[in-house]
Amino acid sequence: MGNRPAELAALLDSVARQDGDAVEVVVVGQGVELTGLPEGVRTIELPENLGIPGGRNVGIEAFGRDGGDGYDVDVLLFLDDDGLLERTDTAELCRRAFAEDPELGIISFRIADPDTGATQRRHVPRLRASDPLRSSRVTTFLGGANAVRTSVFEQVGGLPDEFFYAHEETDLAWRALDAGWLIDYRADMVLLHPTTAPSRHAVYHRMVARNRVWLARRNLPAPLVPVYLGVWLLLTLLRRPSVPALKAWFGGFREGWTTPCGPRRPMKWRTVWRLTRLGRPPVI
């Protein structure tokens, strides 16, 4: 969004320093003019902020083949503009991981604070998050630091534009898992990123609640929808948010039921079992 020029320059430099073949880069400006970027970086300037999934979908389509279906590349990296690739072999690690496992569809990187090296619990996409240095199969991924095989987008579509912010990664992850793809959390693929709280965004509580309802309505078998949302309602109350935050949350929860959520494609029951075996049944 044009408000982190120094951080973006550092990120692009860390991408340019990757070992192996050069990484083609597209920067999407969300309602801002993009200037001063390195030579060879493609830019797309949108007239307005489309939100996280909308902007990323524009970036995805920038790699589409001219005049035909499919993509010019096999894998896409998505990196937050205030992040920094710690190592120079991350791109090569990605290439190797996808080449060695044809069923691997998505890789979630580890996000670490540049000063302390610590990884926030919320940045480990599994319930057992006490050891962020342990890689594993997971059921979702981190939106600001990941790699996705373009075959996944070809098969299940892109991120849900209407979500704007929050839970768009889980929506894509559930659709990918339902189509038979696997998702890995890789502790050795690191994006340095300052420690932040998601609630810093003014729309956080409303969007989280609204999109949680949309996520369930779009993807879960009907009997699991009230269970999933009931669990998250209880967890929200147990966290004892402030009165304004709780009011915004319930407003978003109501909005999730009363507004269109996009196409409903409930996952197969075997996918529910698969998620359960991976340690995160789709009720939490």
Image (spheres, helix red, strand yellow):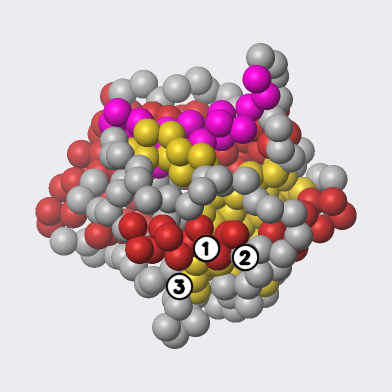
Three-letter amino acid code at the position of disc 3: Gln
Kindly identify the residue that appears in the image at 39 percent across and 46 percent down.
166
Q: Which mark is residue 36?
A: none
Q: Which mark is residue 17?
A: 2
Q: Secondary structure at mark 2?
A: loop
CB within 8 Å, label 2 to label 1: yes
Q: Is residue 139 magenta?
A: no
Q: Secondary structure at mark 1?
A: helix
Instruction: Decide which of tag 2 and tag 3 comes sooner along the chain.
Output: 2
Gap in angstroms between the C-alphas marked 1 and 3: 25 Å
Three-letter amino acid code at the position of disc 1: Asp
Residue bounds of the magenta highlight = 46-66
* Most foreground residue, 36 or 171: 36
Pointer 2: residues within 10 angstroms few (<14), some, or many (20+)?
A: some
Residue 3 visible in image: yes
Residue on which disc 1 sits: 13
* Most foreground residue, 1 or 230: 1
Question: Image check: 123 left or right of 52?
Answer: right
Three-letter amino acid code at the position of disc 2: Arg
Gap in angstroms between the C-alphas marked 2 and 3: 26 Å
Residue on which disc 3 sits: 120
- Name the outermost residue toward the front: 39
